[in-house]
Amino acid sequence: MKYFHLIWAALFRSKTRTILTLLSVIAAFLLFGMLDAVRTSFDQAGQSANGARRLQTGSKLSFIQTLPQSLDAQIARVPGVKSVAYANWFGGAYQDPHNQVFSFAVSDNYLDQYPEIEVSAEARKAFAETRTGILVGETLAKRFHWKIGDKIPLQSTIFPQRDGSKSWNFDIVGFMHAKDKSAGWYDQLVLMHWKYFDEGTPYNRGTVGWYVTSVSDVNQADRVARAIDALSANSDHETRTQTEQAATANWMKQMADIGLIVGSIMGAVFFTLLLLTGNTMMQAVRERTSELAVLKTIGFSSRAVMALVLAESVLLLVLGGAIGLALASVLIPIVSAGSGGMLNLPSVGAGSWALGLTLMVAIGLLVGAPPAWRAMRLNIVDALAGR
Amino acid sequence: MGTLVEIRDVSKVYERGKQKVEVLHHINLDIAQGDFLALMGPSGSGKTTLLNLIGGLDSPSGGSIGVAGQRIDRMGGGDLAKWRASNVGFVFQFYNLMPMLSAQKNVELPLLLTKLNAAQRKRNAAIALKLVGLEDRAAHKPNELSGGQQQRVAIARAIVSDPTLLVCDEPTGDLDRQSAEEILTLLQRLNREHGKTIVMVTHDPKAAEYASHTLHLDKGTLVEQAALA
């Protein structure tokens, strides 16, 4: 610590250059914090104890292929199955095609599979008794200022009604609330009756998008999954059953490999940062050749001088990186709130801070190594003579 | 007075590309404890090279150098750095202060290598600044000081860890006459009142008058040794 003032003073010897470099580091780690939150958000989807206990069965070919509703009874009879429900993608929009509303048409017992979703008894009763009733996630309801009792039209982007109209009318009968973060997705969802949907559209009659099965023993999940898939083996609707966690991860990957995208962007950003800060450090040390020689003259060892330069480089990265990540911590809730519930990014957690700090120190050491080596090898006599 | 510096048959050869340049030829020299020695000679005569060898900044190509009984020509880089930290103070022509540090912090620099705590470092630096007459300039940065004041800060830095030996390379070379005289008087006081052994390289015969002895170097050889009054 007694050398800190020396390192700090050396770092801010050229204030303008250091501040500009710091801004680059701040921007890079702000981006890192935001993108890591996006990656974490996708990773967390379906990651819960309940997600491991539930199996999801979809078409083996593609998630847009439907399955016969008659499978419901067969799956229910598979040993180890506790209960089974089904759902179909509706794909709605409210008022404007840009106001996409995630909406599922579900079987009557669908909510029984999801204890992490809180729905009041009155709302469940009203939902069961109302053919056009829908349950709406709280965040979504706030976004559109919906109240219980409101009649709302949703435009299906895929399924028209029998008369050709794409507009479907619904009655809001209750709200859904996610009890924990893993089910946060349900705060933005609309659930409607599968029967109303199935009878209303001329397409895919008697079919469902996927089944959700709860197993009695989580350790038997693999065996149950194989048994469910065996039901449709060699048919025209072969299935693939996996845990909800795995299914969600696969679905996300079919949408986009977020990990790869985030990794690629951050790789490019950090590579640029490496060149930029590396150049700054080389220049800073080159300008201070005679000062480093004086330090050696008065008794600082070559290793001590090397350590001072490395510490300066690490300090630059840690200072800028910490500010960048702190800014990301502040901005993420603002961005999430500003998205009206469309984005639900987690705050910068301990894992992101640990990874961020590791990156800061690693980049600091990497960019500091060449000038530190040069400082260590500095010949006092040559440096003082300006050679 | 005993001998502080013993130089025996010292040569220095520099390699510049494929060329070998012998800068010092078989120098023999004793410097007594408490001496104030001026080294004079034309440019390229080897004065600064000899000073660098005495101060342990460079190693001889041949011969031996002993300071206070220690063979510094046999020391490696790390040991030599430690030896310099506790035995030698350096004063340069262009002061070589850290521009981003205050006078106080510049003077404290050598003390960072000791076990003194922050309060002790600050107190010792204040004493050294008072000795050179700059106690009221402690918070000033080098660019807020005149050339003479900067050189006095450099001298305070050189003496703060109480070394036996001060090596000064053209300490007045960048100063006006009045400032130069103040610096030379200060060095003389450090020699006479505080017993510092001083070796000073200078081109200026007037500066050499402040020393108790003057040695002349020419083409890497000692040509004359004159005792001055």
Image (spheres, coloured by chain):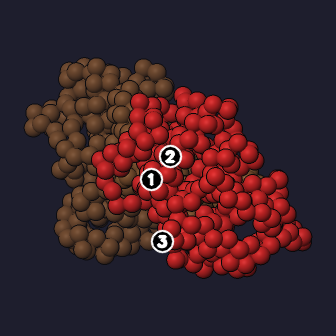
Chain colours: A brown, B red
User: Are marks 3 and 2 in one subunit?
Assistant: no
- The numbered disc on residue B189 is 2
- Disc 3, SS: loop
- The numbered disc on residue B194 is 1
Q: Nearer the viewer, residue A107 or A252?
A: A252
The answer for how far apart the CA atoms under marks 1 and 3 are is: 103 Å
Q: Residue furthest front?
A: B229
Pointer 3 residue: A234
The answer to which of marks 2 and 1 sits earlier in the sequence is: 2
The answer for how far apart the CA atoms under marks 2 and 1 are is: 7 Å
Residue A33 location (% of width, % of height): 44, 44
The correct choice, above or below, for B223 with respect to A21 in the image is below
Q: Residue, x 23% and y 66% (percent of image)?
A: A215
Q: Which of B91 and A384 is in front in this view?
A: B91
> What's the chain of the residue with tag 3?
A
The correct choice, above or below, for B59 with respect to B93 in the image is below
- Disc 1, SS: helix
